[in-house]
Image (cartoon, rainbow, N blue to C red):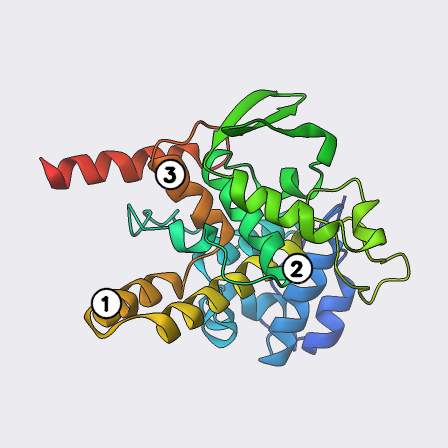
Amino acid sequence: MPRAWQQPLPAMPSVPPVRAWARLSAPPGYEVQWRRLADASLELGLGPDDLAGVGLDVIAGARGWKPATVALYSKVARYGGLALPLPATPEPDPPALDLRPLTQLRGDDPEHLRSTAWCALALGWPAPVGMFRSLRRDQVRATARRLLVSTDDGDWAVPGANIAWHAWETARGRYPALAASPWVLPALRRGPGLESRIGGRLSNQALQATFTKHVRNTVRDLRATAPPSRRDAVEELAAAYRTLSYDSYRRLALAAGAPPVAARGVVRANRATARAAREAG
């Protein structure tokens, strides 16, 4: 158990932030997130007592954290003994969004093909990023009209993803390391880790960064190819995509009627659907 954090006594001088953070132990299983929280606090000269007093809003503003990130680090701080208030879960916004541009092929770059296949599959099989990280190729089977996904949790049929899937499978077949990889979303290059290799399993953080890069590249391509009559619509879509993460992509796919794969995100998707129905009615 991590040592409980306590406010300093009124008559006692405050401990320097670096020493104050060093006195605390990271909660088990959240060592990386705890270190990042401490580093972000120290950049602003905040110790644990300062952070508990002002909350995460100051750090979130400096780092540009999204509400989901604030919720994560609030949980990590509480697990470590810091008495931070629990942030309210934000309402899903927008309740609906055109996600099809993220599933359309715009070139033959392997990184683009991998991301497009991921988004096309996730549009009908909106699994959390951790499930995609561990999804193996032998768990996905292509038929003439759809992809069939089989996991320990059940079987799903995913229509509309065949073109992107076959394009990605054809591209990875040109590279021996990718062709031999068992993962649906393998690493395309070596990372900083000693065990990182081409064709290896990506981390959750790497997949989140991959999705963000794919969204940014999609917006760039849409702006470059949009006719004058579509420029206003493209700019409106680009503004909505600016805050799009894979978690919100999943929630939007669920709100559009995709079958639930895991419990995470279903409640928020139902809220978005109910709100859209109220606004329409």
Of the image marks 3 and 1, the number of the one nearer the N terminus: 1
Label of residue 28 in the image: none
Of the image marks 2 and 1, the number of the one nearer the N terminus: 2
* CA–CA distance in space, label 2 to label 3: 33 Å
Provide the residue designation for mark 2.
110
Provide the residue designation for mark 3.
268
Indicate whether 52 appears above or below 258: below
Q: Secondary structure at mark 2?
A: helix
* Residue drawn at x 40%, y 55% as measured from the top left: 101
Pick the front one: 280 or 49? 280
Q: Secondary structure at mark 3?
A: helix
x, y percent for residue 37: 63, 64
* Residue drawn at x 22%, y 39% as measured from the top left: 275
Provide the residue designation for mark 1.
230
Q: Pointers 2 and 1 in contact (CB under 8 A)?
A: no
Q: Is residue 202 visible?
A: no
x, y percent for residue 41: 61, 72
* CA–CA distance in space, label 2 to label 1: 28 Å
Q: What kind of residue is marked 3?
A: Arg
For label 3, the crowd category at 10 Å Cα-Cα, with few meaning under 14, some 14 to 19 and many 20 or more, is many
* Quadrant position of the C terminus in the picture: top left
Q: What kind of residue is marked 2?
A: Pro
Quarter of the image holding residue 219?
bottom left
* Residue drawn at x 49%, y 28% as measured from the top left: 145
Q: Pointers 2 and 3 in contact (CB under 8 A)?
A: no
Of the image marks 2 and 3, the number of the one nearer the N terminus: 2
Say whether residue 13 is left or right of residue 249: right
